[in-house]
Amino acid sequence: MKVTIDGHEIEVEPGTSILQAARMIGGESVPPAMCYYSKLEGTGGKCRACLVEVSKGSEADPRPMPKLMASCKTGVMDGMEVKSISSPRVLEARKSVTEFLLINHPLDCPVCDQAGECDLQNLAFQHGKEQKRYQEEKRTFEPENIGDNIQLHMNRCILCYRCVKTAEQLTDERVHGVCGRGEHAQISTYISAAIENEFSGNMIDVCPVGALTDKTFRFKSRVWFNKPYNAHRNCPTCSGKTTVWMFGDEIQRVTARKDEFHEVEEFICNSCRFDHKETSDWVIEGPRKFEKFSVINQNNYTKKLDHVVIKTEEHILEGREQDRKKISMKAIPFTNEESKE
Ligand code: SF4
Ligand code: FES
């Protein structure tokens, strides 16, 4: 079926969401996404950053949709016409959503480890208003220790639920979630149980803000001083394909590899992430290229990578088969080339 976004026409499979179609087109028409994560089932619909205007519903029913729609949760119809960056209504709505997300988020970018690769920072840079209208006090939380490797900064959380979905879908037993509702909602581990599962570190990568950061990297460096390299090792638990963030010949941080939409390509285990910080642990492949727009990394990022092909499924809310395989790490064949050596 055909869909037109900001004047760009594309043919997609039934079941494709507007956001996925926009990602296939690429460029400025791609709506920002603070909660949707294509690698995790059931994400999206929480933040409203991805709102778009549907100016023509479909060929069969050309009436426009009266309200702006969350593009991550709205499937395309044949002949649908969508306005993203070209709609003044959408741009105004993005400003309001950004203002809303920043109501409780502290302005601590100067001391936050996520600065430079923070989706909220990027959203505010692109769509933020100069002044806030919120007079009340921001909500604050007592610091809570959730284990040796992950630092929780609840004050920065935007309740996108990505980490909860990661824990639910990557680990055997979810021990943290959103407790309380409304103003009192917070990510917690119930009686501060440590998150010990060997894939729990992926929550750091999926968190769009600095609410979950890497304790082993904490305050070591600003990310823009690090040089990212693709690296791999023969890991018995995950694929071992990572990005190592180097300062000189020192590996200061290890993360999963992220695509141009800032989403993890393959989830990695905690051993690769936290325990292997020697260059001798890794086969360094070469500099990592990025395309993602970012506040700090402007000019450092390369141009668009390969054309993005997103395979769609029949029921967009149920996730894709290949994602489910990746998420249940059991399906990953560990007999790759390195492990045969
Ligand atoms: S801690 Fe991060 S990933 Fe989890 S809900 Fe909050 S913002 Fe989202
Ligand atoms: S990305 Fe669509 S609502 Fe959050």
Image: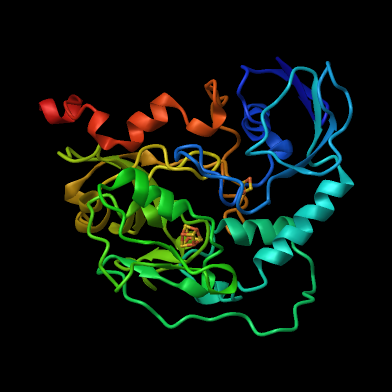
Residue 135 horizontal side relative to residue 36, left or right: right
Single out the residue that lies furthest toward the left: 341
**Residue 312 in the image, given as x and y percentages of width and height:** 54, 22
Residue 340 visible, this orientation: yes
From what the image shows, is residue 59 above or below residue 237?
Answer: above
Q: Quadrant of the C terminus?
A: top left
In the image shown, does 324 or 309 lie closer to the viewer? 324
Q: Quadrant of the N terminus?
A: top right
**Residue 291 in the image, given as x and y percentages of width and height:** 57, 41
In the image shown, does 41 or 28 lie closer to the viewer? 41
**Residue 74 in the image, given as x and y percentages of width and height:** 68, 34
Residue 336 horizontal side relative to residue 309, left or right: left
In the image shown, does 325 or 274 lie closer to the viewer? 325
Specify the quadrant of the image occupied by residue 139: bottom right
Specify the quadrant of the image occupied by residue 316: top right
From what the image shows, is residue 179 above or below residue 228?
Answer: below
**Residue 85 in the image, given as x and y percentages of width and height:** 80, 42
From what the image shows, is residue 106 above or below residue 209?
Answer: below
From what the image shows, is residue 101 above or below residue 184?
Answer: above
The structure residue drawn at horizontal position 60% and vertical position 33%, both measured from the top left corner, is: 304
Residue 255 visible, this orientation: no
The structure residue drawn at horizontal position 65% and vertical position 64%, both measured from the top left corner, is: 101
The structure residue drawn at horizontal position 68% and vertical position 51%, both measured from the top left corner, is: 49
Specify the quadrant of the image occupied by residue 241: top left
